[in-house]
Amino acid sequence: MPKRVKLGHHYYYIVTVDELHSGGFRGKNVVIEGSIEDRPLIEFLPMELPGYRTTFKVSGIRIEFAGSPCIGMGDRVKVYGRFLGDCIMASAIETERALYTTEE
């Protein structure tokens, strides 16, 4: 079993993209590391509770984050979140300069 790290109240498996594609980590908390492939898309969501959603890709895996972190194309990031099979719903994004978290 891969190594785990703790962030906040949860443990996350440190995995590679190949391990995610093998299908054994669907529904589990994971952390991956890599560079952001294109410009992140930051959407304003003016529904009942106004907020932002940021979407980007790391190593071909789509990442969704509830917030507007200060990140850009080419930035090296660590993404903590739940792997849903086709994307990771991120609960935290770590860069060299900051750690961005969202409420759980």
Image: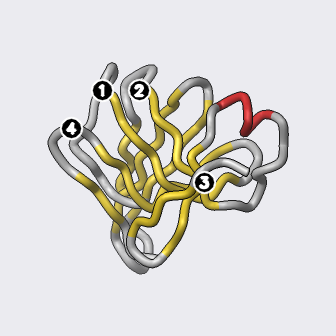
Label 2 amino acid? Answer: Ile
Q: Distance between the residues labelled 4 and 2?
A: 13 Å
Mark 2 touching mark 1, by CB under 8 A?
yes
Q: Distance between the residues labelled 2 and 3?
A: 20 Å
Residue name at image x 67 percent, y 52 percent: 83
| Marks 4, 1: nearer the viewer | 4
Please give the label number shown on residue 96: 4
Label 4 amino acid? Answer: Glu
- Residue 68, how many percent across, how many down? 29, 52
Toward the viewer: 95 or 45? 95
Please give the label number shown on residue 36: 2
| Marks 2, 3: nearer the viewer | 3
| Marks 3, 1: nearer the viewer | 3
| Marks 4, 2: nearer the viewer | 4
Question: Which quadrant of the figure has residue 46?
Answer: bottom left
Label located before the other in sequence (2 or 1): 2
Question: Which quadrant of the figure has residue 75?
Answer: top left
Label located before the other in sequence (2 or 3): 3
- Residue 95, how many percent across, how many down? 27, 40
Q: How far apart are marks 2 and 1 (CA)?
A: 6 Å
Q: Name the residue under label 1.
A: 75
Which secondary structure lies at badge 3? strand
Label located before the other in sequence (4 or 1): 1
Classify 7 as above or below 13: below
Pointer 4: residues within 10 angstroms few (<14), some, or many (20+)? Answer: few
Label 3 amino acid? Answer: Tyr
Please give the label number shown on residue 13: 3
Q: Distance between the residues labelled 3 and 4?
A: 21 Å
